[in-house]
Image (tube, coloured by chain):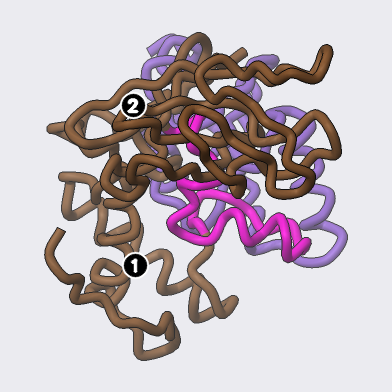
Amino acid sequence: MSESAAPKRRMFGSGTTIEDLKVYMAPFVDRLGYKFNTETEFVDEVLESELEILEATGDIFCPCRVRSGDPKEDAKIVCPCIPFFRDQFAGISKCWCGLFILRDVEDGADLLGVIEEVHGAVEAPVFLAEDVPPGQIRRVKIGKRDVAVANVDGEFFALSNVCRHAFGPLGEGFMDGPVVMCPWHGWRYDVRDGTTDHPNADVKTYETVVRDGEVFVIVEMK
Amino acid sequence: MQVKLYALSTCPYCKMTRKFLDESGADYDLTEVDLLEGQEREDAIAEVRRISGGASFPVVVMDEEVIVGFNKKRMKELLGL
């Protein structure tokens, strides 16, 4: 991607315009595997609602969800809320409102309207392959799942982020070939199959797929 | 049929749902949750969570059935249109 035109500081207030929101959000959702809906009038309508909410509340909360009053919970519905609902949104190819759609959806008009419960396997986009070079590992939340995704010589592997020893974050660990060392006490896991030398402490793994430079983790929706 | 709509005043799908219900001539009971305050708001959110399992809008109740989102097809079926 070329150098972004987005401002460095996120300063939304009474002078903020729809255009400001677009410029700020576009490079971010791009990294998450999404783009603005192709229905431009609908996009403007949603952003217009967000500006009203900004005026009333001080932040751009989702126009389709209600604030609970708990700041931690409410932070999950500040637009764009994609990182907190990766699994659900991947299943319906859009965010709840339909403001954003998956990168490979050609016509967002088909997606307006019905919101269905998602069941079965879902390919959730997590990051661009170029953002995590070989020898690196990154933690991602996919719905309620806490996952670590590693790049081993150009191949991507996903496993539970949570070390079975003391719950350390494997996604912040150190890679050594196909092995990740937990950053807390150095427990080692093979990222390819989640195995470790410690008895009964293997972690769950997930299938991954790479398409058009984008990494997806396959998760099962109940 | 008893029709209830839980909506947010800011939400595009809620507007579409209202437009659809208005145009279909259905008699419905509208609650705009974000415009409520205090206990009334708390109660409405609790009710939406109870019937829909979340706090996403719109939520349409047609007799016993709960529809989350703007599902024109299902609403038409239930209204017999």
Residue A177 horizontal side relative to residue B6, left or right: left
A199, above or below B70, in the image: above
A89, above or below A168, in the image: above
The chain ID associated with circle 1 is A
Q: Earlier in the sequence, mark 1 or mark 2?
A: 1
Q: Position of residue A10 (x, y in %)?
A: 42, 80
Q: How many marks?
A: 2
Chain letter, purple in picture: B
- Residue B57 appearing in the image: no
What's the residue at 43%, 66% (across, down)?
Answer: A50
Dividing the picture into quadrants, the one containing residue B73 is top left
Q: Residue under circle 2?
A: A155
Label 1 neighbourhood size at 10 Å, few (<14), some (14-19), many (20+)? some
Q: Which residues are magenta?
A: A62-89
What's the residue at 66%, 59% (across, down)?
Answer: A74
Tag 1: amino acid: Glu
- Residue A17 appearing in the image: yes
| Circle on res. B64 | none
Q: Position of residue A148 (x, y in %)?
A: 56, 36
Residue A176 horizontal side relative to residue A209, left or right: right
Contact, mark 1 vs mark 2 (Cβ under 8 Å): no
The Cα–Cα distance between marks 1 and 2, rounded to whole angstroms, is 42 Å
Nearer the viewer's eye, disc 1 or disc 2?
A: 2
Q: Residue under circle 1?
A: A48
